[in-house]
Amino acid sequence: MRTLDEMLTLSSWTRELPAEQLSRVRADISVRDFAAGASICRKGDPASAWLGVIDGLVKIHSLSPAGKSVTFAGIPAGAWFAEGSVLRGMAFKYDTVALRDSRIAFMPESTFRWLLDTSIPFNRFLLKQLNERLGQFIGMVEHDRLLDPDARVARALAGLFNPHLYPDSDPHVQISQEELGYLAGASRQRVNRALQVLEKAGLIKVDYGLVTVLDLNGLQQFEA
């Protein structure tokens, strides 16, 4: 699995930090490994850390008392999340679950707020991060209400390639049909059909456990 140092090197907000600040950040962050299916944080837990996916894939979702689940986002390796919860100083309003074996970085809230108070580059990063996240969620509501399953699968794949939220994007996406179904709100069987449609359209190439994106713009614009 990727190391914390590798992720920090990849993260754009670390590049303008003075060496002493980066050294404190590295020392304060703790790292934990989670098996596929394990809960990383639960709804109602205190938001006491900013989270980063060093390796693996996680989903942010919520489960109703009746058992209905809605997925808000898939978070691939290289991405940081939960800044909104930490900024509000409130409990998490969602659950985060590892879709595959994952390594997670936990930056304590105290370190996060220290960076807010001392680093202009970190503040600029967070402003853009929050704006991109807002756009992502607005798009998800639109897609869920207006698009059919084929197009929702296309958008779920395209959503993993936001260069700010997910800087480690690779055209070869290691993702199972079940994992993609969680992100698109569709069954594994329906995802399989959608992938066939998208492959025939020349937008992707499908192999076992692997999707290669051939036309990202086409995925972002696809409508059946």
Image: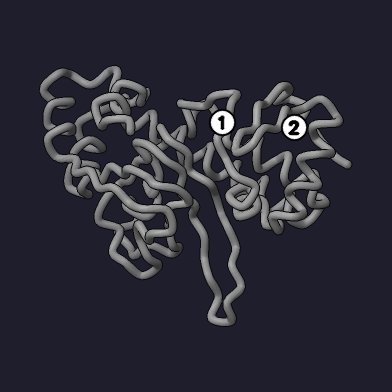
Where residue 208 sits: x, y (%)? Answer: 64, 37
Question: Where, quadrant-wise, is the N terminus in this rendering?
Answer: top left
Q: Position of residue 190 (x, y in %)?
A: 77, 54
Q: Nearer the viewer, residue 113 or 172?
A: 172
Q: As displayed, is residue 224 above or below residue 15?
A: below
- Distance, label 2 to label 1, CA atoms, is 13 Å
Residue 112 falls left or right of residue 91? left
Asked where in the image residue 107 lies, by quadrant, the reply is top left
Which quadrant of the rendered structure holds the C terminus? top right
Q: Residues within 10 Å of mark 2 (few under 14, many from 20)?
A: many
- Would residue 138 be seen by someone viewing this image from the given angle? no
Decide which of 48, 167 is in the foreground and name it.
167
**Proximity of marks 2 and 1: CB atoms separated by less than 8 Å:** no
Q: Which of the 4 quarters of the picture holds residue 64?
A: bottom right
Q: Which residue is mark 1?
A: 162
Q: How many marks?
A: 2
Q: Residue 6 in the image: x percent, y percent?
A: 29, 24
Q: Residue furthest front?
A: 208
